[in-house]
Image (spheres, helix red, strand yellow):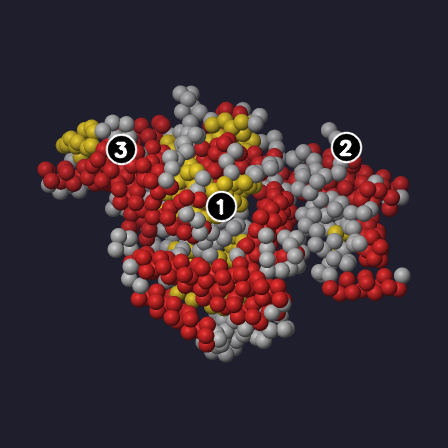
């Protein structure tokens, strides 16, 4: 039993807040584990638990996310928690369902996009480990690359040239995401952080190709 | 009826039949040119028709000298005789300011009251001064009456559709109009999303679909992913001032130019403009079937004849159609997909009958658009489906997005975006701002909607000021501005200064909205039964709360009844009976008191349940060593 107690203590220290000690359901006053969206007794919707986006959607905390699984979890939870399910309920239930749906949308939007996911994961795992200002521009090679690409885009004056730059940016983005995945897998947070910054630049550039194409206009 | 004490419910299920279900909930498509009301029952949607079998109610309102209104076909017929007393296309003015109308009035058939800038626009109709909200409320009342006549019972709740591209001001105005008409808005649903719901359920569609919705005054384009009952909007775009009306304008201008060429310039009254637009509309409609025709124009006491063929019509409207095509491209780019990924294109709105529109849509998406459901009725059909889903539960789910970015004005008139367009709703986001001058104690917050980078090119939604910031050096204060958009697409903004905790909270009821005061005056003026209506709403709320409390206690007793002594159980039973009988009556205070006393009586029971819950949770952690994990539900099977 002594060993068992130790395990329990360790679990409690690392478990998300509220999991070990249940909270009182606002509706029936009964116990609800902190991560549960519904009271197990009276089924009333609960406030969103203060957990990270991965836990909220029932996913492992890692960079590689299976999009099909992500979508399925998100849809399943929204089916239960979306305000449309509470349109005729009490104001409190409507408010809570809205808070739950907001938290789900935030989690989904963050994890669906590789850039936002990488950024989030760096912050989640890196707080206290990585130096402050990891995202500031202090990487000359990166800065140079970004400036060169921007200049190339500004100089492009045909749609074909812009298309070429966009294709290159998209390929770089795909490569960059793959490398980020490897670095997270190796536990190299600093490397992942650096490449996340690069991904931001590349993404911005791809967006700017759209603007540039509109400036040049069709039929040039 | 099942004994509630024994019921075990799945999460999200309504425990007891709902108190408010005796009244009906309808779906309403409040259109620029025509409106439609539909209701769901017995597994199919019924679009409600008049005695002549017409589902479309022209969105036309005629006012008599005493202020009473006539809506629909009859009002449309009055358009020729009493053009000054008739309002058409009022939807185009929803949530619009006087400034907006100034730029439109040259072409729009409205008599705008001269008013100070910044308020909601007012129209002069038959000697009355009316807001677009009041005029729209008349249309909604007519639809409500049509439904009530048909069903023989009160209709007080509705899903009302709005263009996906409607901004916050226009959405708020629509909701206000429904309130004025005595309708509780269950949800504002975007028109293309409603159409997708009706279409998808009908056809069992799966995959990526585009809804191209060109109505009388608005254009929406939405890209949705449909999958197993989930309708997920990926991106939306549009123009809230582009529709069939603009086709009519183009044709009318063509006619008037021809007339000026032969008779010289003449200034037209707003009544004559309305008639010219009617001729133009007739021409447009005829040319969907025939190749050419001749139409007359009456003004200044002289009649002129104008010939128009389809090729000329298409040349006149081509620039407008190309604007929709460009918006289609933009939405596909936003979602990162190409036309080839799109599995089907649904056409919605009367203006999609124009052959040029169909042809261009087919070209852009490389496929013939689908038109299985009547494009005039599909939106109301979807709205009725959603009304049923909201009141009676459903397996389908609509996941919609914000059509326009939301932000606030920062230094130099720039816009800082807080919620980008195409973000799923509901959404809440916050951003920190700071002071830019030493000793600055107030901060003006200007809420904007739109995609442009400069504040004066975006739509201004609201201005408010946060006062009482302690004097600090520039950049030291921490002002947190939080934006929340609900499932109706309506925005609430709050600001909070962190060092002092000063807070300001505004539901964005803004620049072009009605104030709460104006709204209550209107409610008072326009509804004889406003007080009764309010009382009924309040009692419904109390009943819903009573039902919630009963369900909660019943579930608690079912789960943890072993913690109750017989006499305590009896007392709880009595308190529940008291709540039930109070809820059967009409005394709101009695219901609230009974609920409070039930909660009071069950408090010791709740405490014992919590104690046990905590003990079990701790026990669970000791058990996990042997069982592999805590199981919160391990004890639920006991009852």
SS class of the residue under badge 3? helix
**Lower sequence index among marks 1 and 2:** 2
Measured in 3D between alpha carbons, the distance from the residue under mark 3 to the one under mark 2, in whole angstroms, is 62 Å
B360 is higher (above) or lower (below) than A143: above
The mark lying in front, picked from 3 and 2, is 3
Dot 1 crowding, Cα within 10 Å, few <14, some 14–19, many 20+? many
* Quarter in which the C terminus of chain B is drawn: top right
Dot 3 crowding, Cα within 10 Å, few <14, some 14–19, many 20+? many
- Picture residue at 41% right of the left edge, 44% below the top: B340
Dot 2 crowding, Cα within 10 Å, few <14, some 14–19, many 20+? few
Q: Where is residue B75 in the image (x, y as percent from the top left)?
A: 34, 30
Q: Is residue B170 visible to the viewer in this orientation of the structure?
A: no
Residue beneath label 3, please?
B284
Of residues B582 and B525, the one drawn nearer to the viewer in this rendering: B582
Of all chains, the one bearing label 2 is B
Residue beneath label 1, please?
B233
Residue beneath label 2, please?
B3
Of residues B505 and B199, the one drawn nearer to the viewer in this rendering: B199
Measured in 3D between alpha carbons, the distance from the residue under mark 1 to the one under mark 2, in whole angstroms, is 41 Å
Of residues A133 and B181, the one drawn nearer to the viewer in this rendering: A133
Of residues B71 and B40, the one drawn nearer to the viewer in this rendering: B40
**Lower sequence index among marks 1 and 3:** 1
Q: Where is residue A98 in the image (x, y as percent from the top left)?
A: 59, 50
- Picture residue at 63% right of the left edge, 73% below the top: A129
Same chain for marks 1 and 3? yes
The mark lying in front, picked from 1 and 2, is 1
**Lower sequence index among marks 3 and 2:** 2
Q: Quadrant of residue B186?
A: top right
Of all chains, the one bearing label 3 is B
Query: CB under 8 Å between callouts 1 and 2?
Result: no
């Amino acid at each position: 039993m002594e060993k068992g107690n130790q395990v329990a203590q360790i679990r409690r220290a690392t478990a998300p807040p509220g999991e070990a000690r249940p909270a009182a359901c606002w509706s029936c006053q009964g116990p609800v584990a902190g991560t549960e969206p519904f009271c197990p007794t009276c089924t009333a919707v609960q406030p969103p638990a203060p957990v990270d986006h991965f836990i909220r959607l029932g996913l492992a905390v890692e960079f590689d996310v299976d999009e099909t699984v992500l979508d399925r979890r998100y849809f399943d939870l929204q089916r239960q928690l979306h305000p449309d399910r509470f349109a005729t309920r009490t104001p409190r239930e409507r408010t809570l369902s809205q808070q739950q749906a907001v938290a789900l949308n935030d989690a989904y939007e963050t994890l669906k996009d590789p850039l936002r996911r990488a950024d989030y994961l760096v912050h989640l795992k890196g707080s206290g480990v990585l130096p402050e200002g990891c995202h500031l521009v202090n990487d000359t090679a990166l800065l140079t690359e970004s400036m060169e690409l921007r200049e190339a885009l500004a100089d492009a004056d045909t749609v074909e040239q812009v298309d070429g730059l966009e294709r290159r940016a998209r390929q770089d983005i795909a490569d960059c995401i793959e490398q980020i995945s490897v670095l997270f897998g190796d536990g190299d947070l600093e490397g992942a952080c650096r490449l996340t910054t690069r991904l931001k630049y590349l993404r911005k550039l791809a967006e700017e190709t759209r603007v540039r194409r509109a400036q040049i206009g069709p039929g040039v | 009826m099942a004994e509630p004490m024994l019921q075990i419910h799945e999460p999200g299920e309504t425990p007891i039949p709902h108190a408010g279900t005796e009244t009906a909930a309808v779906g309403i498509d409040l259109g620029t040119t025509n409106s439609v009301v539909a209701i769901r029952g017995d597994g199919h949607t019924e679009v409600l028709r008049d005695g002549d079998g017409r589902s479309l109610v022209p969105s036309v309102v005629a006012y008599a000298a005493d202020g009473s209104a006539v809506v629909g076909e009859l009002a449309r017929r009055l358009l020729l005789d009493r053009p000054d007393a008739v309002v058409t296309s009022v939807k185009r003015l929803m949530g619009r300011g006087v400034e907006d109308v100034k730029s439109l009035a040259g072409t729009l058939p409205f008599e705008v009251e001269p008013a100070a800038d910044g308020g909601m626009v007012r129209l002069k109709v038959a000697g009355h001064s009316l807001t677009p909200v009041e005029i729209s409320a008349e249309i909604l009342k007519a639809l409500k009456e049509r439904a009530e006549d048909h069903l023989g019972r009160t209709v007080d709740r509705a899903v009302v559709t709005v263009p996906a591209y409607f901004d916050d001001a226009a959405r708020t105005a629509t909701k206000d109009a429904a309130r004025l008409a005595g309708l509780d808005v269950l949800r504002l649903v975007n028109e293309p999303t409603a159409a997708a719901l009706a279409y998808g359920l009908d056809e069992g569609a799966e995959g990526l679909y585009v809804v191209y919705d060109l109505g009388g005054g608005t254009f929406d384009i939405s890209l949705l992913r449909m999958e197993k009952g989930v309708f997920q909007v990926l991106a939306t775009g549009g123009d809230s001032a582009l529709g069939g009306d603009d086709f009519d304008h183009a044709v009318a201008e063509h006619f008037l130019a021809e007339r000026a060429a032969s008779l010289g310039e003449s200034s037209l009254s707003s009544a004559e403009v309305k008639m010219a637009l009617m001729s133009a509309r007739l021409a447009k409609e005829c040319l969907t079937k025939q190749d050419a025709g001749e139409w007359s124009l009456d003004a200044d006491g002289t009649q002129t004849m104008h010939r128009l063929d389809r090729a000329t019509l298409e040349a006149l409207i081509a620039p407008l159609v190309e604007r929709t095509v460009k918006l289609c491209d933009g939405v596909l780019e936003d979602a990162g997909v190409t036309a080839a990924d799109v599995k089907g294109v649904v056409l919605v709105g009367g203006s999609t009958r124009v052959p040029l529109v169909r042809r261009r849509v087919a070209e852009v998406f490389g496929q013939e658009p689908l038109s299985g459901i009547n494009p005039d009725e599909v939106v109301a059909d979807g709205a009725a489906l959603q009304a049923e889903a909201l009141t009676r539960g459903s397996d389908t789910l609509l996941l919609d997005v914000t059509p326009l970015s939301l932000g606030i004005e920062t230094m130099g008139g720039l816009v800082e975006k807080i919620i980008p367009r195409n973000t799923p709703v509901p959404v809440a986001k916050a951003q920190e701002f700071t002071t830019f001058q030493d000793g600055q104690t107030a901060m003006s917050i200007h809420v904007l909607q739109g995609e442009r980078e400069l504040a004066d090119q975006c739509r201004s939604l609201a201005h408010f000021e946060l006062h009482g910031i302690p004097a600090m050096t520039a950049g030291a204060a921490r002002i947190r501005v939080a934006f929340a958009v609900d499932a109706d697409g309506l925005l609430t903004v709050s600001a909070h200064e962190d060092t002092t905790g000063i807070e300001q909270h505004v539901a964005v009821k803004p620049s072009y909205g009605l104030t709460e005061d104006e709204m209550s005056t209107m409610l008072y003026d326009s509804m004889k039964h406003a007080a009764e209506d309010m009382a009924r709403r309040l009692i419904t709320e109390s009943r819903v709360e009573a039902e919630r409390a009963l369900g909660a206690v019943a579930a608690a007793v079912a789960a943890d009844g072993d913690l109750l002594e017989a006499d305590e159980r009896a007392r709880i039973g009595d308190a529940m009976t008291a709540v039930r009988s109070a809820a059967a009556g009409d005394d709101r205070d009695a219901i609230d008191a009974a609920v409070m006393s039930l909660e009071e009586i069950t408090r010791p029971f709740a405490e014992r349940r919590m104690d046990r819950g905590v003990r079990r949770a701790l026990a669970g952690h000791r058990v996990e060593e042997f069982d592999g994990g805590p199981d919160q539900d391990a004890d639920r099977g006991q009852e």
